[in-house]
Image (cartoon, rainbow, N blue to C red):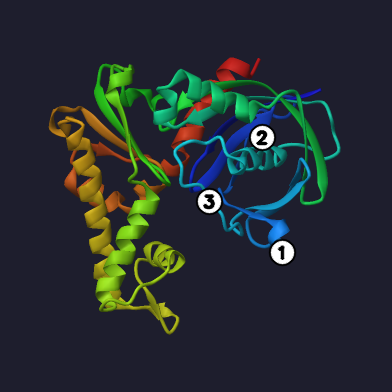
């Protein structure tokens, strides 16, 4: 029997897991991340490329990761994509062709799901499965059982990672994810149900604003989502292999407009950031606007690795509970 302790955030943009085998060296902690996207091989065969995995599960064959074409646009995470992403990521911690693998994990949950007990239980049971799970990834067979799952709020990992930000403080966590932005107001490390909110204002919205700005720059000509996503990552459009300097101001404008929308949502939920001790920004989307945040909000805090703060913090919770 090999026992594994993991934390997982099956995000709309990216799937992230951290953990280790309890029978291995305590410093042997592994990180796994890939895009939460899939391609059904029934739609035509393609070879696996990039940060992707070929997954066979319950009679279906899929490519999970960067090469996928379908992604989730729903707040709910009880779709086959989320299960396949989670299980595929778990196999990256296991030895192939072994059977006695026991998984205990802490799973990040969307705030909208967290607030409804029935929905929270549905998500937990959906990922946990019912007994042994058999799956083939990249040609290797894996078998494991998820013995127990603890559910924690998305974005809450930073509370366990950097407690000094919350002890005797009133602190707002703003989690900028793939589809959503979540807000959680903590008072001395406690967040009540009524002090949480969620809005559809994550990476997808930022990319939409980037597309709008690029269209203005190109005098009405549109670009696809992938081009906008790359322009956001590069800081501008490419022209003949080099960054087009005239496009940079439009990408910066998109980031500023997105930041304004984020702050508008916070205000709409009747949160006055000026009276807070701290406003903490986490999530991968935060990295795109961190310079604006730091400039506009003097008492803001951005973890150096904001996209990993949720799973890193929740791993501490997982190890404390299951690492005996």
- Return the residue at label 1: 44
Q: Judge from the rendering whether residue 81 lies leftward or rightward of residue 178; answer left or right.
A: right
Percent from the top left, x then y, of residue 34? Answer: 58, 49
Q: Circle 1 — which element?
A: loop
Q: Position of residue 167 (x, y in %)?
A: 30, 18
Q: Earlier in the sequence, mark 2 or mark 3?
A: 2
For this rendering, which residue is in front, 159 or 35? 35
Which callout, 1 or 2, points at the residue further toward the start of the chain? 2
Q: Does 275 sit above or below residue 66?
A: above
Distance Cα–Cα, label 2 vs label 3: 32 Å
Local crowd size for mark 3, using a 10 Å CA cut-off: few (<14), some (14–19), many (≥20)? some
Image coordinates of residue 278 in percent, x first then y, are 24, 31
Instruction: Please give left or right for residue 304 compared with residue 298 in the image.
Output: right
Q: CA distance from mark 1 to mark 3?
A: 18 Å
Q: Is residue 243 above or below residue 266?
A: below
What is the tally of numbered marks visible in this picture? 3
Q: Are marks 1 and 3 in contact (CB under 8 Å)?
A: no
Under circle 3, the secondary element is loop
The residue labelled by disc 2 is 28
**Foreground: 258 or 57?**
57
**For residue 71, which numbered disc appears in the image?**
3
Question: Alpha-carbon neighbours of circle 1 within 10 Å: few (<14), some, or many (≥20)?
Answer: few
């Amino acid at each position: 029997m090999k026992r594994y302790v993991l934390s997982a955030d099956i995000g709309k943009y990216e799937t992230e897991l951290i953990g280790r085998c309890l029978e291995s060296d305590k410093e042997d902690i592994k990180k796994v991340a890939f895009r939460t996207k899939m391609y059904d091989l029934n739609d035509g065969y393609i070879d696996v490329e990039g940060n992707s995995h070929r997954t066979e599960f319950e009679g279906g064959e899929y490519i999970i990761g960067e090469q996928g074409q379908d992604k989730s646009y729903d707040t709910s995470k009880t779709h086959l994509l989320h299960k396949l992403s989670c299980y595929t990521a778990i196999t990256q911690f296991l030895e192939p062709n072994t059977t006695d693998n026991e998984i205990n994990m802490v799973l990040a949950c969307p705030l909208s799901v967290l607030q409804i007990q029935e929905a929270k239980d549905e998500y937990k049971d959906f990922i946990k499965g019912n007994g042994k799970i058999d799956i083939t990834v990249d040609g290797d067979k894996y078998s494991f059982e998820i013995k127990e799952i603890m559910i924690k709020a998305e974005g809450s990992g930073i509370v366990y990672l950097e407690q000094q930000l919350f002890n005797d403080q009133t602190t707002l966590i703003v989690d900028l994810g793939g589809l959503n932005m979540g807000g959680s107001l903590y008072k001395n490390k406690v967040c009540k149900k009524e002090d949480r909110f969620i809005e559809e204002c994550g990476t997808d919205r930022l990319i939409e604003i980037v597309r709008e700005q690029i269209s203005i720059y190109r005098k009405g000509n549109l670009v696809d989502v992938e081009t906008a996503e790359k322009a956001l990552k590069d800081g501008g459009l490419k022209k003949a292999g080099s960054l087009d300097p005239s496009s940079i101001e439009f990408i910066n404008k998109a980031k500023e407009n997105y930041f304004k929308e984020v702050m508008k949502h916070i205000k709409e939920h009747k949160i006055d950031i000026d009276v807070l001790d701290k406003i903490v920004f986490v999530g991968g989307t935060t990295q795109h606007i961190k310079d604006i945040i730091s400039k506009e909000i003097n008492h803001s805090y951005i973890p150096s690795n904001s996209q990993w703060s949720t799973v890193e913090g929740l791993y501490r919770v997982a190890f404390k509970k299951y690492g005996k």
